[in-house]
Image (cartoon, coloured by chain):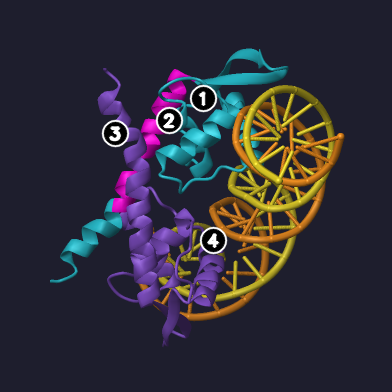
Chain colours: A cyan, B purple, C orange, D yellow
Amino acid sequence: MVPSMTKMTEATYFILAALLEAPLHGYGIIKRAGDQSAGRVKLAVGTLYGALDRLTEAGLVVLDREEVVDGRPRRYYRITEDGVVAVRQEAVRLQQAARVVTGQIAVMGA
Amino acid sequence: MVPSMTKMTEATYFILAALLEAPLHGYGIIKRAGDQSAGRVKLAVGTLYGALDRLTEAGLVVLDREEVVDGRPRRYYRITEDGVVAVRQEAVRLQQAARVVTGQIAVMGA
DNA sequence: GGACCATATATCGGGACCCGATATATGGTC
DNA sequence: GACCATATATCGGGTCCCGATATATGGTCC
């Protein structure tokens, strides 16, 4: 189930956002999150794998497939429908939070 | 100094946002944060006073004045110029983060 | 050949921070 | 008298971030 996580951490949000387009493996998520945020978000590996475990347990992400490239394993994660819903809800929440301040700025001259 | 806090917690953000209009005392901050977020943000007292201490130490908030009403003390906090800068930067950061997802939604049909 | 870096996974421990519980105190409502 | 809103403050548990560390491969540079 997990109908509504009231809150989502920033790392979790960017991991889900990175997976919206296509499944990615851990290292790919780190790079994509950096790209999407113009370099501002730098996911630490310790953050990533812990968050992926929690997301998997919560059903927002599933293991898509495993590949072996040059003897090194690559584990691809895919976002679930629940995950898509959750990350969109969070985006709305972020936008509303931003508006609390950006809205006030416009009126502050009064 | 504190030129740029790379990251800001949600509680910190809403505390600063609550103080943008006028100085408030602790309990007033909790109520105002709830109002500004349409009831979604419920600051716990333990969160508030810890965060206020950190914000004061960081120079984003200062003690404005103390009043005594009905024998009970009221401690008013005021946001500093650095605090205003920080909360506006954070609002921009939140908006940009939201756009990572909301922007993609529009293109997903392609 | 050796140093170093990018790629790729995983774990551990310290630290930051949220938050419920608890304590204390006053004044109003029922 | 019980209960709630107002108002402050602290403590402890739990969550989570993140740097450090470990392991392994292949490419570049000297």
The chain identifier of the residue carrying mark 3 reads B
Q: Residue at x 34, y 55 (%)?
A: B91
Can the viewer see residue B2? yes
Mark carried by residue B21: none
- Label 1 packing within 10 angstroms: few (<14), some (14-19), many (20+): many
Look at the image and give the residue range highlighted in magenta. A79-98
Considering only order in the chain, which callout, 1 or 2, is on the residue closer to the N terminus? 1
Q: Most extreme residue toward the left, as rendered?
A: A110
Q: Residue at x 23, y 62 (%)?
A: A104
What amino acid does circle 2 point to? Ala
| Label 4: which secondary element | helix
- Label 2 packing within 10 angstroms: few (<14), some (14-19), many (20+): many
The chain identifier of the residue carrying mark 4 reads B
Residue that badge 3 annotates: B103
Of badges 4 and 2, the one in the foreground is 2
Of badges 1 and 4, the one in the foreground is 1
Of badges 1 and 3, the one in the foreground is 3
Determine if marks 4 and 2 fall on one subunit. no
- Label 3 packing within 10 angstroms: few (<14), some (14-19), many (20+): few
User: Can you give x and y, in whole percent of width and height, for residue A51 in the image?
Assistant: 60, 35
Q: Residue at x 46, y 61 (%)?
A: B12
Residue that badge 4 annotates: B47
Considering only order in the chain, which callout, 4 or 3, is on the residue closer to the N terminus? 4
What amino acid does circle 3 point to? Gly
Of badges 3 and 2, the one in the foreground is 3
User: Can you give x and y, in whole percent of width and height, for residue A83 in the image?
Assistant: 46, 25
The chain identifier of the residue carrying mark 2 reads A
Residue that badge 1 annotates: A60
| Label 2: which secondary element | helix
Mark carried by residue A86: 2
